[in-house]
Amino acid sequence: MTTTTPSSKADHGLRCHALDVEIGARPVARELDLVLRPGEFWGLLGANGSGKTTLLRHFAGLLPPAGGTLSLDGRPLARWPRRELARSLGMMQQHADYVFDASVLDVALTGRHPYLGPWQRESRDDRDHAMRALATVDLASLADRPVTRLSGGEARRLAFAALLVQSPDTLLLDEPTNHLDFRHQVSVMRTVGNHVYGDGRLAVAALHDVNLAATYCSHVLLLYGEGEWQAGPAPDLLNMDNLERLYQCPVTVVDTPDGRRFHPSFSRLSDGPSAD
Ligand SMILES: Nc1ncnc2c1ncn2[C@@H]1O[C@H](COP(=O)(O)OP(=O)(O)OP(=O)(O)O)[C@@H](O)[C@H]1O
């Protein structure tokens, strides 16, 4: 007989212990020792190809680490039955290529699958839940539209809605604001923030927009390449030196009424635009 030991509150969250993540022989993160706790919103930042998606896929238990351990709520990820894991942890993937003509509502309802039996149909409650999530991402009026006829930004918001419908305690998001206009970028980040700071969930989002990370994330994990990383509170780590190292690009820091903001230093770029 197997028994399940109830995890204590202190165990809650995602714990990386001496975690080695590699792609082929190339290190993404070496000896990653980190606890990501409920109530924290982590921004995962790094240059293109630095391994953000790969690391998120490890956090989701989709890839085995090259070394070390990863546990969720005190239990090694490898020992979670997939279905049970899908009720506790969900991932919004970077690309959602819809090839079947399912409706927007049908795709949102896939978030309920971890809660249904093998041949069980979605209930009225499930549909209400999905419609509320579609309303949150401004897609309620498109509920019956085939997903193959969505714009890039609409498809992105639908993938986010499906994660909201799944409603896991740990949310992994791979570039959730890609393709989104200003209003919808803010809406997605605020919604994640409400799940984290309001409901006490954990979120980890791979992001390219440093300013969104500075505004909404409590913590950041920076992937510098060659397995080197740095992690900690966002206000401590988001500075010019770290960002120039991260992106190999000169960075300007501006203090604004909305807080500290970062952008590429166009005038210090050797091949950048000049005034004359
Ligand atoms: N299955 C694979 N086999 C070989 N190389 C891979 C595989 N998957 C990803 N890569 C490579 O590993 C590197 C890291 O990919 P990954 O998608 O994790 O980076 P990323 O930081 O998310 O990048 P981006 O910011 O461009 O989305 C890239 O150079 C990519 O081409």
Image: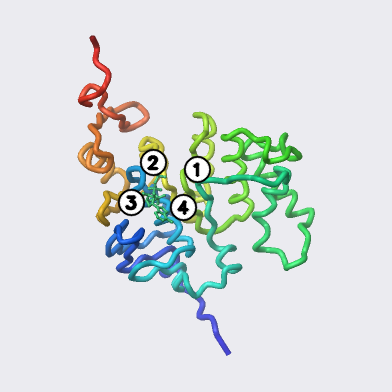
Within 10 angstroms of label 4, few (less than 14), some, or many (20 or more) residues? many
**CA distance separating discs 1 and 4:** 12 Å
Check disc 4 and report its element: helix, strand or loop.
strand
Q: Is residue 142 left or right of residue 191?
A: right
Within 10 angstroms of label 1, few (less than 14), some, or many (20 or more) residues? many
Residue nearest the viewer, comparing 191 with 249: 249
- Residue 5 image point, x, y percent: 50, 80
**Which residue type carries mark 1?**
Pro
Q: Quadrant of the N terminus?
A: bottom right
What residue appears at the point 67 percent right and 63 percent down from the top-left corner?
115
**Which residue type carries mark 4?**
Ala
The disc, 3 or 4, on the residue closer to the chain's N-terminal end is 4
Mark toward the viewer: 1 or 4: 1
**Which residue is denoted by mark 1 in the rendering?**
176
Check disc 2 and report its element: helix, strand or loop.
helix
Q: Is residue 236 left or right of residue 106?
A: left
- Residue 154 image point, x, y percent: 61, 36
Check disc 3 and report its element: helix, strand or loop.
strand
**Which residue is denoted by mark 3 in the rendering?**
221
**CA distance separating discs 3 and 2:** 11 Å
- Residue 160 image point, x, y percent: 57, 45
Q: Is residue 230 left or right of residue 82?
A: left
Q: Residue furthest top?
A: 276
Residue nearest the viewer, comparing 259 with 100: 100
**CA distance separating discs 2 and 4:** 12 Å
Mark toward the viewer: 3 or 4: 3
Q: Residue furthest bottom?
A: 1
Residue nearest the viewer, comparing 166 with 190: 166
**Which residue is denoted by mark 4 in the rendering?**
203
